[in-house]
Image (cartoon, helix red, strand yellow):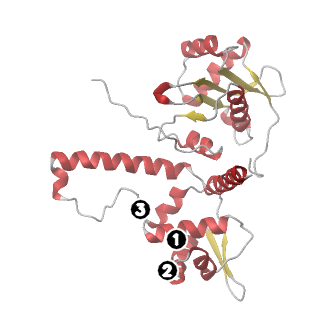
Amino acid sequence: MRLQKATHYGLYAVLELARDPSRQLSATDIADIYGISSNHLAKVLRDLGRAGLVDSVRGAGGGYRFSGNSRRTTLMDVINIFEEIGSDSTAAADPGDETDIGSALLLVLGEIDDIARATFGSITLDTLLKTMRWQREREAKLVD
Amino acid sequence: MNSETRFLKVNIRSAIVDDLQKIINLDAEVTGLEKKEYWEDRFDRFTERDGRHLIVAESMTPGDVLGFIVGEVRAWEFGSRPCGWIFAIGVDPEQRIQGIGEQLYNAMCEAFKSDGASAVRTMIAREDQLNMSFFRAQGMMGGPFIELEKPLD
């Protein structure tokens, strides 16, 4: 599956900031780490700010800081700020959806969406950051 | 364990017959469904058997069961190498977020390792976000198998 660009940027930003909540980073700092557009990221950070996940610090040396609860915020919470998985209510139903093949395909796509929602909803930011550390430790063990 | 979590000191041990009714009560409280016969059968099958484990977390007051976990090592079903399966875990709702589930999970993983298993596996309903989040927080991820089913009508 593919997430929209804004969602992806939002996850990068919120996880990068949650990695060390005492640290402040500018949109440009984060954009440089992930090789993405700082203009687009600035807009995404404003959305994250409105959702209460990041605080902006003004002035010289200002930037953004994580202000959410990493043990309570799931990946799904962040994704929901930018898009709704499997429910594009703005898109008109395809005429083919009414056919037997179309409705069978919708059933399969619905199954994939259900799994995606359950997966994103069960992973907190804290769990993802821990998973990342465990993976690094496992890889280091394999090298030794 | 996250530093924000209070880690309650508990005694982790294999279940004994005196724990059975407490496990039945705790499971009924957690799941909303009493399964007396199921647990009596589990107790008979899982206590003091190689590769099968029914472990409880007891408070510092002997006999005061705060949580339980059940699992066994199974091998070669669907081509799977020996793997520890966790069938059920339950913690007293009033005693959550104190690391009891994590201590039970770790004890079960140690038991599985002693039995020769190299991985631990479980199955969770998609809507059961509480348990799914718990197992994910222990480092569990989607594995190489997908569960399929069909209503028999």
Question: Earlier along the polypeptide chain: callout 1 or callout 3?
Answer: 3
Q: Is residue B112 visible?
A: yes
Q: Which chain hosts label 1?
A: A
Quadrant of residue B112 within the rendered picture: top right
Q: Which chain hosts label 3?
A: A
Q: In the rendered image, which quarter contains the N terminus of chain A?
A: bottom left
Image-based side of A94 in relation to A15, left or right: left
Image-based side of A49 in relation to A63, left or right: left
Numbered marks: total: 3
Name the mark nearer the viewer: 1 or 3.
3
Q: Are marks 2 and 1 in contact (CB under 8 Å)?
A: yes
The residue carrying mark 3 is A2
Please, what is the three-letter code of the amino acid marked with disc 3? Arg
Q: Are marks 2 and 3 on the same chain?
A: yes
Which circle marks residue A9 in the picture? 1
Q: Which chain hosts label 2?
A: A
Which residue is drawn at the image coordinates 16% and 45% (left, top)? Answer: A100
Q: Position of residue A95 (x, y in %)?
A: 16, 57
Q: Classify mark 3: helix, strand or loop.
A: loop
